[in-house]
Image: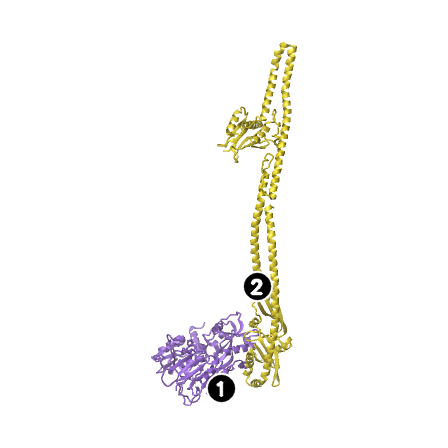
Amino acid sequence: MTFRARLLLGFGAVVLVPLTVFGLRIRAVMANRLTAEYQQRVAALVSVIRADLDRQSAGIALRLAALRDAIPRDNLFRTALQGGERTYLLDYAGDAMRLGGLSLLQIQDESGRIVSSGHFRNEYDRSDPAVPRLLATAPAGTALVEARTAEAPFLALARVDSLRVGGRRFTLVGGIAVDSSFLAHLTPDSELTVSVALPPDTSSGADPATQVVSAVTVPFVTSGDSARLLRARIVVSHSLASLVALRRGVALSFFVAVLVTGLIALLLASWLSTRISRPLTALAAKTADVDMDRLDVAFDSDRSDEIGALSRLLGAMTERLRAGAARLREAERRLAMGDLARQVNHDIKNGLIPIRNVFRHLGQAAGDSPDRLAAAFRDRQATVESSISYLENLASNYARLCPQPAGESCDVNAVVRETISRVSDTGQAELRLELAEGLRPARTDALVLRRILENLIGNALDSLAARAGRVTVSTAANGQGGVRITVADTGKGMTQDELNRAFDDFYTTKPGGTGLGLSIVRRLVLDASGALRVETEPGAGSAFIVELPGETW
Amino acid sequence: MIPRHRYVIFLALFAAACRAGVPRAELPLPPPAPAPGDTTCTIAVGRAARRDTVTLAVSDPVDAGHAPLPRNDAERLVFGQLYESLIRVDCQGRPLPGLAATWEEAPGDRWAFTLRDNARFWDGAPVTARDVLASWQSHDATLAASLTVTGDRTFTVAASDAPFQRLADQALAVTKPAPGSGWPIGTGRYWMTSGDPASPDAFVAQPMARSGQPAVKIASGPTGGARDALDGGADVLITDDAATLDYARTLTGYVDVPLEWSRTYVLLAPGRDKSVIGDLRLESLREAVHGDARPAEWSGPGRFWFADLHSCAQAGRDTLGASARRHRIVYNQSDRSAADLAARLVGLGVLGRGAVAAGVPASAFESSLRAGSDAAYVLELRRQVYDVCRAALELPPWSSAATIEPLLDVRSHAVVRRGTPRMTLDWDGTLRLAPP
């Protein structure tokens, strides 16, 4: 994971996690407080409903008591009971119900037969003794009753009372309708809902997850032949819709806040990480450029922070490396000079020994038989000349180790052509030139370049080992303002071990080779501020690529 | 092999036997001259005092669009003053001259009629035989097709199986369209003027001839306003409201005259399923309604007319499928007695537990009744009809294969102020102001 990614993640975590936790906490606290408030409101309304039911029950009792007193005094009612105008009897409960502000009124005789019904006039003569009997046993004498009408049943809060007329006992069942308006009247708040849950399902359908629910238990008298006294519930529920909406709003706000904050954090982290990682990346790039041959990379920095310190440390380290490399080169040079001295000593001795032997022979001949001195000289002249030639050649080779390059503009293609023209014997090899047109001049010494090319072309021709093959010399711009010269052959190529040692002094695989050719080439190229690399494959050939700096226009 | 001529003889004998088995309505005798003291079908309360206007108060709505066929007692009272059929039938069932002054049997099983000499439309145009034909063509194409114009005021009508009295049906009253007016032009002794904008529920009918007859003002209002009408000096109040009648009986200037049992409430249920009706105790129904009612009973020969609908060729078959019907007893919500009866039926458990009574607007009631989409209907039917098959057309097509259970007979009362001009009562309950 990159430093930038880690920085982004860290920044996000530092900003977003606390914000999210804060938001969730706010939501939870808000929900808990509102729910508690709703529960208090529901509980308060339950108390109010209990009191209201008691008040309504007392009111019904008062109205029934008034009827209980009025009916015996009504002569028409009394007469109707004794076979008089029955229509009066049938209409009595309806009129009394309306005048008394009731929604349900039933007058039953002692057998439970309906004598007069206000809410359902034409149910007269029906027997329904269970309702008053069960009402009488209900706690507080009040219960919800499922009353019947011609059109539809309705629910009523009812009480029972009784009276005697003409020696007969009658039962009064009176009540008020528990309908939607009644329930709506119970709740002053539109967010509070009052409903009635009747057996067998007393759940009222309220979902506790979406509502705060409480209930008042009320006795309930079922209708029909199998009338029973059960328990119904008046359920008070407070919708949590507003809370849910509030939560959604808060969640949305927090989501937007998290999103915006995250975006800002992302941009900030990106900017910060860029600010931090850019000098590091540049430092890494500079560090990657450091090589034993390139220790001139500058790590100067005026930053006062850790990156500046690191840069300066790297600069100091490079400086030390540069000094170390110089000492190493000096050591190598001294070592090479020692080796060279020993080699020169050895080589010169090898050249001088035949000469000394010849002169020893000539001295002996001059002493022993002077007349044979001339013959002896003639016999040994070739040896002396050969040794002198050897020494001259040796001197020439050593002289090549210390050229004095001149930094001047050099037409590479011209030097290549001139060098090629000096090659007299190519054997079976084909020598090919692929010179780029309009090639920019290189900044190097032409003599140095010719020595480089002579060595590389000679090595290439030698690698063919008198077999048919091809040596290609090509030039091209290297894309960095310099010149690339490639000497490629189709010779035997080099193994990795041979390649590792190819540039060592005096290492050679050729019979009669000095082992200094490639060493000289490498040194000459580096002295010309160029670069040399080799691409080789055993059995396929090698390509020596020389990169030389271009002339500044 | 039976010879072909024997087929012909057999078919001829069979046709003759069938023809003989269906007796043709006999031509009634010309009406006897009314005896001076014959007040059988007359309502007269005290000595008639001279009045310029007689006020008739009704509690049912009056709709000119229904003319000349009345749909309720109020319209029957109003239309009876305005429109005439060929004949009238008095409360005893005796045919009396109406638009036709005389009639006699004509050759070819036909009846020949002669129109009244002074028969005129409200616009003054004399009534001709062609006017009768044109009017009938818009009301009864079959009957119109049997009419042959024989003179300016004479025509013949083919005798049929229907009783002669059916020609007194208000649906056959002779009218002609009145462009620009909701009231068709009739031939009665009164013509309807435009209503009073100040009192849209009141109509004024003026006498056609200046013969000393008073104008007639018809005041239509709700039942609760009936007592106010009496307090306001209405001459005749037609009502079936018990409370109003109780109040009227306390007024010394008025007399309560019960009219004929003119309507019967029935329970109409698709299908011939007696279990739907159960064992109804009709006597317990009488107290369910607030008007003057009695358990349904047919006092004449035979049965209620709606018990024989299957004999009408035009009566449709039960085309109702076995689709689920709503478990309710439906009634017209403007009919209070129907509402009481439906409630009582529910109270008695007709249709079983869970059935309810449902009052719906008149239009919804009509469409439900036509579709037969409910379990049962409570509706009122006329007790007396001149033509069963014509009356059957007012019922849904599936009625001929349905259960029609008569429940209650009801009647209205005429509360008549003393000194009000004499009125006559026809067989179908139509009250008419008698000429002085």
Residue B263 versus residue A506 in the image, above or below:
below
Does label 2 lie on the same chain as label 1? no
Q: Quadrant of residue B167?
A: bottom left
Numbered disc in front, either 1 or 2? 2
User: Which residue is at the front of the view, A33 or B196?
Assistant: A33
Q: Which chain letter matches label 1?
A: B
Q: Residues within 10 Å of mark 1 (few under 14, many from 20)?
A: some
Q: Residue at x 59, y 84 (%)?
A: A72
Residue placed under numbered mark 2 in the picture: A242
Q: Position of residue B384 (x, y in %)?
A: 46, 81
Question: What secondary structure is marked by label 2?
Answer: helix
Where in the figure is residue A294, as x and y percent of width and height? 59, 35
Frontmost residue, B14 versus A213: A213
**Residue B431: mark in rendering:** none
Up-down relation of residue A90 to residue A31 (above or below): below
Q: Amino acid at mark 1?
A: Arg
Q: Quadrant of the C terminus of chain B?
A: bottom left
x then y, percent, for residue B145: 39, 75
Chain identity for the colour purple used in the image: B
- Decide if residue B85 is in sight here: no
The chain coloured yellow is A
Question: What is the three-letter code of the residue carrying label 2?
Answer: Ser
Left or right, residue B62 beside residue A253: left
Q: Which residue matches tag 1?
A: B249
- In the structure shown, which secondary structural element does the residue marked by tag 1 occupy? helix
